Amino acid sequence: MRDFRRNCRFQINGLIRGLVIFSLAILIGLSALNAQEATPKLSFFQPADTLHKPRFWACAGSGVAIYGAASIGLYNAWYRGYELTGFHTFDDWGEWKGIDKGGHFLTTYTETALIFKGARWTGMNRKAAAWTAAGIGIGLQTTVEVMDGFSEKWGFSWSDMAFNTLGAGLFLSQELLWQEQKIVAKLSYTRPNYPVFPIIASNDGGGVTTLAERAKELYGVAFVEGFLKDYNALTIWASVNLRAISGAKSSWLPPWLNLAVGYGAENVYGGFSNNWTDDAGNDFSLDPVLYPRYRQFYLSFDVDLSRIPTRSHFVKTLFTILNWVKIPGPALEVNTLGGVKFHGFYW
């Protein structure tokens, strides 16, 4: 068994190395579409007009190093403690009320957008940068899926890959069609106050827990942990720029004003249902009448930070990096329980 697990790890690490080499090859090959080197007189945050070789190789080298370190760190943090097996698939469609699928969509879109900006900073032309960013964005997420495929606890998910592709595809299609992002994927986070009253185990009555403890087990307690994986707290947004969508006749609209449509879920304490077994063998089951799992849909205004006028290349870069986070504001909620709510302030 030890040799089998070592062999699985070798296969995973080999695939990681292959993806690193493939990503670097894409960068080198597409850079050949650019013929000239940019002028050296540039401020650090100012994008180059044509290919700037020192910037290109700095980005390629640091990107490969970060990717390799992140992949190894991810494997050791998430996968090493679980049993490994042969590569297999897993149908997780319907888990977590679709919030995890929204997370895949958002993550790949954001990765693609940031890689594109990095490629453009080196002077790579727009079309090459867009294809490069989409390819690497999907490649990064594929690494995670391949690791899942060798873990006995999880498996390679085709539905995850579909949403990874949709995320990269949203960025790529807009860049190829309009040379701008009229629709931006964003995220917001408001963690619920989880109840602390006792829940009795259903099998023998000896086990006791709380929803606060269950949320801690699933989603962690630190802000960063929750921000990444608390499915009751996250809202995934498609933020549409009103002036860009409506055309030149709407020049009276602020260039940064967006209308955002969001998706969230509530009362999610398990993948497919609110039933679970703890490490001591106690079975817990939530009353679906008291804790119905339901979907939430939101409508809210937003700000496209990348469209705020500024002469500072540093500020523009900072706004671009932060643009995946939705700006808090009033929101209208409609949910699948038939409820309609107005939130004076929602994030």
Image (cartoon, rainbow, N blue to C red):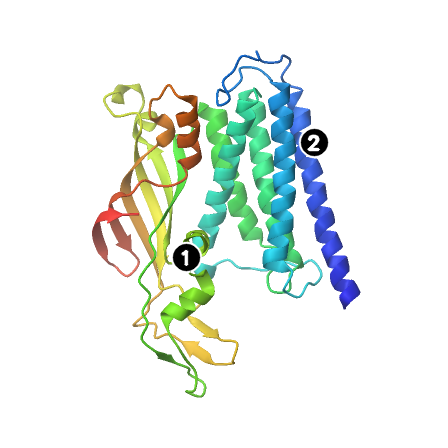
Quadrant of the image for the N terminus?
A: bottom right
Side (left or right) of 291 relative to 181: left
Q: Earlier in the sequence, mark 1 or mark 2?
A: 2
Rendered location of residue 74, percent (x, y): 60, 52
Location of residue 206 with respect to 184 vertically, above or below: below
Q: Which mark is residue 132?
A: none
> Compared to 101, does 22 lie above or below?
above
Disc 1 vs disc 2: Cβ atoms closer than 8 Å?
A: no
- Mark pair 1, 2: CA separation: 36 Å
Question: For residue 204, what is the image quadrant?
Answer: bottom left
Q: Residue tagged by mark 2? A: 25
Three-letter code, disc 2: Ala
Q: Is residue 185 visible?
A: yes
Q: Of 162 and 327, which appears nearest the observer?
A: 327
Q: Residue at x 42, y 52 (%)?
A: 227
Circle 2 SS class: helix
Which disc is residue 231 wearing? 1
